[in-house]
Image: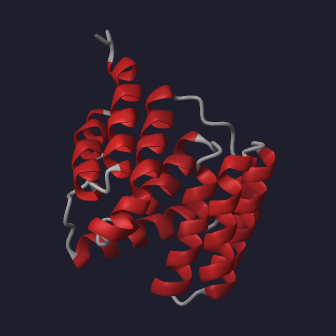
Amino acid sequence: QGQTLLDTVKIYEIKIEAQIAQNLNLQAIKTALPILELLGVSFALAPTEAEVKDEFLQTYSNISGREVEDLIELPVMSDRSKLAAMTIINSIVPCSFIAAPALLPLLICQQVNLSLSYGNTSLSASGYVFFGLLLCSLADDIPQGYRFGQLSLQIVERFQAPELYANVIAVMYATI
C-alpha cells in the first residue's frame, strides 16, 4: 500500500531477508534486481567477464586522482533513493557470493561509485572493504587494497555502525 517507490523499499528489504533466511539466495537476488532498477541501478544477473572488467576499470578510473584517505571526507549521502539502493545492494552481497559470483564485483563497484557520487553512508564501509578485496585479487594492488580496508574501518567508526564492524573486520583481515 505504499504511495511511492521509497515506501515500498522496506517491504522489498524484508522479503529479501526472508528469502535469505530460507536459503533462497538466487531468489533474493532476483527479487532485488527489479527494485534496484527502479532506484536507477541496474545489473544483469549473469554479467559477462568483459562487463565485470569494464565496471571494475570504470570504478578504478573514478577513484584515480583521489587519495583513498581523502574519501572519508566525502559528504554524507542524503539522497533517499541512493541510500535505499545501498541497503538493497548490501543485503544481496553475501547471496551473490554464493548464488551469482559473477555479479559480486558489479555490486561492490556500484556501492563504491554511489559513495563517490552521492557521499558516504555507513554502508560505504562494506563497499570499500570489498573493493579493497577486488584490488588485491583482480588488480594485484595489495597496498591500495589495504588502504581501502583501512578506509572502511574509519567509515564504521565515523558513522558509529557497530553492526558492520564484524563483517568489515572479517573481510579486512581474512582477505586483504
Above or below, 165 against 103 in this view is: above
Residue 130's spot in the image, x, y percent? 54, 68
Q: How many tags in the picture?
A: 0
- Farthest residue to the front: give it: 22
Above or below, 13 against 48 in this view is: above
Quarter location, residue 149: bottom right
Residue 6's spot in the image, x, y percent? 39, 22
By what rule are the colours in the image chosen?
secondary structure
Q: Dividing the image into 4 quarters, which one contains the N terminus?
A: top left
Residue 116's spot in the image, x, y percent? 56, 51
In this orientation, which residue lies closer to the viewer: 130 or 29?
29
Quarter location, residue 120: top right
Asked if residue 156 lies left or right of residue 91, the reply is right
Above or below, 111 against 144 in this view is: above
Residue 58's spot in the image, x, y percent? 41, 66
Is residue 55 visible in the rendered image? The answer is no
Quarter location, residue 69: bottom right
- Farthest residue to the bottom: give it: 140
Q: Dividing the image into 4 quarters, which one contains the C terminus?
A: bottom right
In this orientation, which residue lies closer to the viewer: 12 or 83?
12
Is residue 113 visible in the rendered image? The answer is yes
Residue at image point 54% right, 58% down: 127
Asked if residue 93 lies left or right of residue 128, the reply is left
Asked if residue 170 lies left or right of residue 112, the reply is right
Residue at image point 64% right, 71% down: 170
Residue at image point 76% right, 48% down: 73
Asked if residue 5 lies left or right of residue 74, the reply is left
Above or below, 52 against 42 in this view is: below
